[in-house]
RNA sequence: CGGGGUGUAGCGCAGACUGGUAGCGCGUUUGGUUCGGGACCAAAAGGUCGGGGGUUCAAAUCCCCCCGCCCCGACCA
């Protein structure tokens, strides 16, 4: 492909709204163009790279035994009512009406559609197991789109769904997808970290996320320094530190803390360490008020709390509820004397002397011993894990990192198959519910994650497997007819060998071409110039390496082929 | 949705406080000189100053309303 024929619009400076390296580079290299918030056009180069990722995904899905389908992006509201998710995802979905005033949604995901498919098409255990997949555009009304393709309103996703006769069989389907994901990301040149994850609004019982470690990642995770444990912060557990129990003869006493509401304010005012304060949070669990206690230096993990209480829906109590339940304005809640259920972080189970709110305006209590002075319904691990917490498996300290979620595998169970009656007849003629799994890869996000993980100050460094072109053929001076001619015939030869060539035939100065070459990040650069031709050679340079080598014109194509083959 | 910011040529920005001919760099076009790491000279094109309303002799500039975009937060598979 000639540069002059396609459209490659490189930018010397990044648009001001690009924040992270990968987004800036995608804009600068002319891969994508913004239409509006969270909406991007793929330009020719970006599309080529995207297709490469899709190809890898398809090959590995097929290899794992999954079969491709294509479901509508436009979906009737009814199926979302049927699964019960219409109310859950309502605000996240784009909703439209047809001329008959029927409400439709633009699919944010496809569990409902695929389960409907399975319910209609699968009747017998002989048809199972089945794993379906598609690569489809998803639509989500993101509250805040950002970082280019990382969080967009419209994006490409590979989603797969498995149907099995039993939980045991479903485990095998799950493992097959898990293994395929490992291969996919490896082939994309990505280093990923697999973490245990929360299932969130997806439902289901168990899941793993594939994370690309990056400081710009939107997800937090912890990983054990010693064993293989790693988990999303939404999920991560921690072992409790060994702390000596302490107690006091003194009874709780009120102290005036005028206008001191936050942990920091109270800590400074009472001259008590944050960790010796107990934070009391009031929530509505399925509408009923509860209190939650966590150490003052910790943050409550709402996901853990919801799970501990059996999957209730949680929301922070409003000020009126807090006043009604605690008898005091917000900022002075404490466990002593509360009549609503009180749940506490497990770390508070070891008796200790602490300070809490007094359920009275401008007052806190000191010398509180929870086990003695408060009525705790239950202790659970409830706080967000962080750097230095102990691994729940081996008690070694954990590290905290950030990552980009590129893939997610779920064991779904029967949530959707029950709702849609996706069942089959077993060998004994009994009707059984299928057991499902679902498996997503953010394709467009993966593309950007590759750049986030593989670039330098000069530009993108594409892995050969996903590069828009394998070779950038540069003629530094197109006015020099012999160079141009030699390059043209080299392009023809390379392309006849199946090599993907971008031929920079622009009448630009060499410096511009070399800078653009680095920016685009095409893995192999071949330069045909008056200078190289004097030795009967083509200069070859890899984007990943500083050195160049001179290859005789006659052997260039075989050399490049072996480089390309060697990378596979 | 709350808080903050921002909107001026394709991109990056100045001009606004203190109202009076709309500017700079890069890019683009033409001509010339150059030609291995984002050249130089000369000429040129390109703007409803986000939109609407108001104040004023006069508004990019001051006031009001609306919209887009960005950041932080809440929220979210």
Image (spheres, coloured by chain):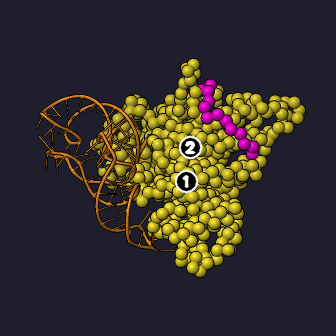
Chain colours: A yellow, B orange
From this viewpoint, which residue is outermost toward the right? A428
Image: magenta residue range: A66-78
Quadrant for the C terminus of chain A in the image? bottom right
Q: Which residue is mark 2?
A: A155
Cα distance between the residues tagged 2 and 1: 24 Å
Instruction: Using the image, name the chain to which the residue with label 1 belongs.
Output: A
| Same chain letter for marks 2 and 1 | yes
A503 and A11: which one is in front?
A503
Instruction: Using the image, name the chain to which the residue with label 2 belongs.
Output: A
A264 and A474: which one is in front?
A474
Q: Which mark is residue A330?
A: none
A40 and A509: which one is in front?
A509
SS of the residue under disc 2: strand
Asked if the residues shown at circle 2 and circle 1 are in contact, with their CB atoms under 8 angstroms apart, the answer is: no
SS of the residue under disc 1: loop
Write the residue at 58% across / 50% down: A47
**Nearer the viewer's eye, disc 2 or disc 1?**
1
Write the residue at 36% across / 40% down: A331
Query: x%, y% of residue A267?
Result: 35, 51
Is A491 drawn above or below residue A247 in the view shown? Answer: below
Hey, which quadrant is residue B25 in on the image? bottom left
Q: Which residue is mark 1?
A: A6
Write the residue at 43% across / 47% down: A278
Is A423 drawn above or below residue B3 in the view shown? Answer: above
Query: x%, y% of residue A469?
Result: 60, 59
Is A120 drawn above or below residue A496 in the view shown? Answer: above
Mark 1 nearby-residue class (10 Å; few <14, some 14–19, many ≥20): few
């Amino acid at each position: 492909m000639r540069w002059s024929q396609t459209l490659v619009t490189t930018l010397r400076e990044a648009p001001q709204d690009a924040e992270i390296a990968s987004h800036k580079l995608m804009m600068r290299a002319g891969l994508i163009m913004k239409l509006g918030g969270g909406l991007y056009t793929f330009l020719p180069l970006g599309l080529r790279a995207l297709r490469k990722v899709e190809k890898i995904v398809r090959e590995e899905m097929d290899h794992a035994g999954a079969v491709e389908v294509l479901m509508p992006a436009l979906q009737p509201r009814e199926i979302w009512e049927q699964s019960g998710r219409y109310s859950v995802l309502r605000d996240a979905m784009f909703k439209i009406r047809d001329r008959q005033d029927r409400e439709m949604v633009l699919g944010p995901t496809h569990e409902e559609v695929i389960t409907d498919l399975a319910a209609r098409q699968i009747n017998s255990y002989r048809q199972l197991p089945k794993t379906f997949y598609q690569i489809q555009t998803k639509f989500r009304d993101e509250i805040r789109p950002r970082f280019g393709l990382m969080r967009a309103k419209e994006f490409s996703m590979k989603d797969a769904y498995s149907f099995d006769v039993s939980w045991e069989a479903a485990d095998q389907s799950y493992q097959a997808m898990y293994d395929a994901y490992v291969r996919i990301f490896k082939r994309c040149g990505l280093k990923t970290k697999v973490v245990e994850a929360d299932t969130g609004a997806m439902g289901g019982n168990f899941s793993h996320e594939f994370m690309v470690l990056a400081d710009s990642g939107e997800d937090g995770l912890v990983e054990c320094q010693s064993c293989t444990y790693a988990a999303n912060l939404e999920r991560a557990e921690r072992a409790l530190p060994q702390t000596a129990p302490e107690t006091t003869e003194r009874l709780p006493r009120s102290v005036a803390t005028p206008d001191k509401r936050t942990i920091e304010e109270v800590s400074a005012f009472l001259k008590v360490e944050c960790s010796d304060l107990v934070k009391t949070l009031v929530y509505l669990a399925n509408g009923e008020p509860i209190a939650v206690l966590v150490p003052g230096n910790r943050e409550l993990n709402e996901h853990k709390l919801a799970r501990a209480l059996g999957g209730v829906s949680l929301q922070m109590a409003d000020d009126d509820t807090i006043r009604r339940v605690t008898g005091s304005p917000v900022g002075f809640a404490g466990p002593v004397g509360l009549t609503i259920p009180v749940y506490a972080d497990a770390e508070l189970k070891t008796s200790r002397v602490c300070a809490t709110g007094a359920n009275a305006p401008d007052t806190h209590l000191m010398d509180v011993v929870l086990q003695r002075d408060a009525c705790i319904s239950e202790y659970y691990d409830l706080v967000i894990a962080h750097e230095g917490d102990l691994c729940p498996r081996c008690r070694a300290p954990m590290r905290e990192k950030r990552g980009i979620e590129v893939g997610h595998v779920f064991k779904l169970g029967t949530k959707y198959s029950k709702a849609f009656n996706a069942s089959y007849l077993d060998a004994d003629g009994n009707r059984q519910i299928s057991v499902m799994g679902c498996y997503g890869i953010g394709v467009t996000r993966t593309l950007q994650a590759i750049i986030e993980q593989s670039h330098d100050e000069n530009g993108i460094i594409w892995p050969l497997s996903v590069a828009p072109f394998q070779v950038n053929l540069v003629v530094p001076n197109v006015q020099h007819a012999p160079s141009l001619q030699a390059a043209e015939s080299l392009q023809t030869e390379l392309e006849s060998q199946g090599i993907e060539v971008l031929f920079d035939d622009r009448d630009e100065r060499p410096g511009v071409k070399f800078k653009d070459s680095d920016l685009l990040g095409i893995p192999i650069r071949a330069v045909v110039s008056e200078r190289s031709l004097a030795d009967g050679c083509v200069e070859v340079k890899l984007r990943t390496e500083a050195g160049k080598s001179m290859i005789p014109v006659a052997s260039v194509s075989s050399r490049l082929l072996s480089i390309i083959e060697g990378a596979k």
